[in-house]
Amino acid sequence: MSQLPRLIVCISGTGTNLQALIDACHTGTLAAQIVLVVSNRKQAYGLQRAAAAGIPTLYAPLKGWAEREAYDADLARQLLPYQPDLIVLAGWMHIFSGAFLSHFPQQVINLHPALPGAFPGMNAIERAFAAYMQGQITISGCMVHYVIPEVDAGPVIATAIVPFHAGDTLESYAARLHAAEHHLLVQATRQVLSERQAQELVP
Ligand code: GRF
């Protein structure tokens, strides 16, 4: 167990993608261990998922910090002792600055519920579905990318196209997209770990 690559997962909400990672680690689909789950929201249900899986949690609210950079630097300081090989942002609603990212070069990846360059920021699924309904786009999907200070941008690791179906509602489309995300996040995490293993950067 101790030789497995170490993941920290950052969440802000329901944590279904966290659950996909937990399940993949348990079944061995993903040869890794989640050593910490971080949430910037106290009520995030994902914290309960982590606790149920016996994974340590850290609640790190932005409130109380006058500057985002100071929060970022402090959070990095708290995470460094966990010696993460990879930090996975899975529905993490906070844009990291260089004050965090500089501590973990090429080690922070993010899931975005749209394709590269499309619908950065909040409510991407809703905005993509509205654009489809207005005839502006014919496909959407999701992606995992390395994190840079610009929101939902950075070198792309993996993408999945999620087609619109005739008769789709926002709910039916969102459900299909979330299912695709759960697969993609596990696949992309595995891919990054294996690339870093090939470079002997992780166990
Ligand atoms: C996902 O759609 C993710 O792409 C977005 O936030 C959602 C998180 O869902 N950034 P969950 O908390 O993993 O269920």
Image: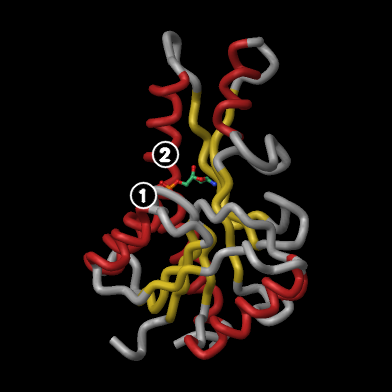
The quadrant holding residue 32 is: bottom left
Does 2 sit above or below residue 161? below
Q: Where is residue 79 in the image (x, y as percent from the top left)?
A: 54, 81
Look at the numbered discs 2 and 1 and tell me whether their residues touch, using CB distance below 8 Å. yes
What residue is drawn where x is 65% and y is 10%? 134
Number of labels in the image equals 2
Relative horizontal placement of residue 71, taking residue 161 as reference (left or right): right
Q: Report which residue position mark 2 lands on.
A: 178
Q: What secondary structure is found at the residue carrying circle 2?
A: helix
Relative horizontal placement of residue 122, taking residue 67 as reference (left or right): left
| Mark 1 neighbour density, 10 Å: few (under 14) some (14–19) many (20 or more) | some
Residue 16's mark?
Answer: 1
Does 119 sit above or below residue 82? above
Q: Position of residue 139 (x, y in %)?
A: 59, 25
Foreground mark, 2 or 1, reads: 1
In which quadrant is the N terminus drawn? Answer: bottom left
- Please state which amino acid type lies under the numbered disc 1: Thr
Query: Mark 2 vs mark 1: which is more N-terminal?
Result: 1
Q: What secondary structure is found at the residue carrying circle 1?
A: helix
